[in-house]
Structures are given as C-alpha cells and as structure tokens.
Image (cartoon, rainbow, N blue to C red):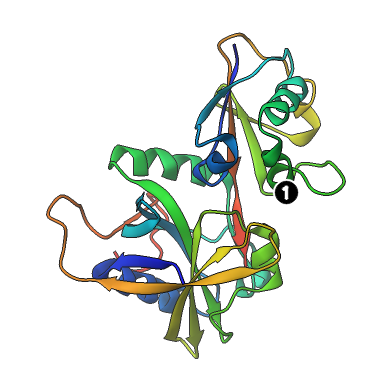
Amino acid sequence: MNKIAIRGEALDQIRAAAELSYPDEGAGLLFGETKEGDRVVAEIHCLGNRREGEARRRRYLIEAGDMLSAEKLAESKGLEVVGVFHSHPDHPARPSDTDREWALPWYSYVITSVDGGEARQTSSWHLREDRSGFEEECIERGVGADPGLGPAVSSNPGEERGAD
Amino acid sequence: MPVVVLPAPLRPYASGNKDVAVRGETVRESLADLLRQYPGLEGQLFNEDGVLRPFVHLFLDGEEITQSEEADANLRMDSRLLVVPSIAGG
C-alpha cells in the first residue's frame, strides 16, 4: 500500500473543514511534494464547493479557474497540488462511482466521513491506471513542523471555509 | 511552436514533461499532435466517444475556451494551451 504523509496540523484542518461544511460536502486541495514515490502533504487550500443547492449535500466541484489559481499559489510556495480532500456527510469515507468518474490519476484523494456533524474516518486513495477503481493509501500523520513551511491552511480570499 | 502545458497528473503520460511543443494552427490540430507524440494521454483526456472528458478544461493564452470554441481556435507560434482539470466527485 502506498503511503502519504500529512503534516499533523494539515490533517486536523482537513477534518475541521469537513465538520464545518456539514451537512454539505466540503472540499479543497492538498499542497505538497512527491519524491521518489513518497508523497508529503505540507498544507491544505480550502475552497468553496461550487455545486449549488441540494447538490452540495452529495456532490462537490472545484472549478478549473480555482485550480489554475491554486496551482500558481502552490508553485509560489515551492509546492505543487498533489491531491484533493473532500467530505462525505453521513456516508463512509470510501470513493463513490462519481468520485471515480471524475478522478485523475496521480492525485491523492483524501476523504473524511462526517456523521451528524462529527468527523469520523479519514482515508486516502489514488485512482488505478485503468480507471476501474481506487487503491487505498496509508496515511502517516506527520510529526512536528517543518521550519521552512508556512501555515498549514490557506483559502481563496472571500471564501473562508473550514478552519483558518 | 505552440506549447501545451500539462497538469501534474498527466505528465507521467508525456514522459514527465510539463510543456510539450506541438505542431498545429488550431487547437484541434495541436491536440492531435500531442496525442501523436504521447498516445497514452488519449484515454485520460478523451472518453470512448472521442469527446474531451468533462473535467478537462482548456485555457488558451490565459483565457478559458469552451468545447464548442476549442476545435477551431487559432494558435500563434508563441501560444500556450493549458490543460486544467476541474475537480469533482461526491
């Protein structure tokens, strides 16, 4: 099983963002690095769920324009977008068919289940090469803070979702 | 030559390259040349019907172009065609 190391503060913020978005799905991006097959998530970038109305309860959308801005922000920090986090309100932390249909290879997909407003399980997955499904990744909670890194969370101006 | 700029998830299908120089006067021709160079990208960019997957967006010289515009939009020799994914699920 592949491993993904997530900075402790960032992992806490992923779960907090999931709770704050409830009963809607919350989502954002993972900023980090990939070296020799090992992935490290340094911080998260919270984004607004662009789905509208009731669809926000079961679906999330990060628009291409937001992705483009986020990629530039990550690059300015010496990082890159290595994946996505989103929540499953009252639903298991496992990828759905909709997740598979929209997934891209290489990214890590971190999913947090939220039951009644409380974050439960957080898991990570990557898409198989043939797009038939996902392989689970082992999350390692990072210890300490890299003195070269900034805060664990950033967000689009005017779209403060999740904890700061 | 125009350049197609690939997002990180697609670079492994282009021998790790982020920027790929392509031949073509239109977006359609440039994407066709991209696939000639790196056939492995086809399944990631296009569905079984040969249509761009819904999460694939194109930005030509800084402006997003719609799928109806994309095919015949003209490229300059210094054009940069960014492939940018939208992310969705649930």
Label 1, residues with CA under 10 Å away: few <14, some 14-19, many ≥20: some
For the question of whether residue A139 can be seen, the reply is yes
Q: Is residue B52 above or below residue B17?
A: below
Q: Residue B46 location in percent, x, y? A: 76, 43
At horizontal 57% and vertical 85% (from top left) the residue drawn is: A92
Q: Residue A43 location in percent, x, y? A: 31, 58
Q: How many dots with numbers? A: 1
Circle 1 residue? B54
Q: Residue B73 location in percent, x, y? A: 74, 20
Q: Residue A136 location in percent, x, y? A: 52, 73
Q: Is residue A152 left or right of residue A71?
A: left
The quarter of the rendered structure image containing the C terminus of chain A is bottom left
Q: Is residue A74 left or right of residue A143?
A: right
Q: Nearer the viewer, residue B74 or A78?
A: A78
Q: Residue furthest left?
A: A147
**Quarter occupied by residue A129:** bottom right
At horizontal 29% and vertical 73% (from top left) the residue drawn is: A141
At horizontal 74% and vertical 17% (from top left) the residue drawn is: B26
Q: Residue furthest top?
A: B77
**Quarter occupied by residue A65:** top right
Q: Nearer the viewer, residue A54 or B31?
A: B31
The chain letter under disc 1 is B
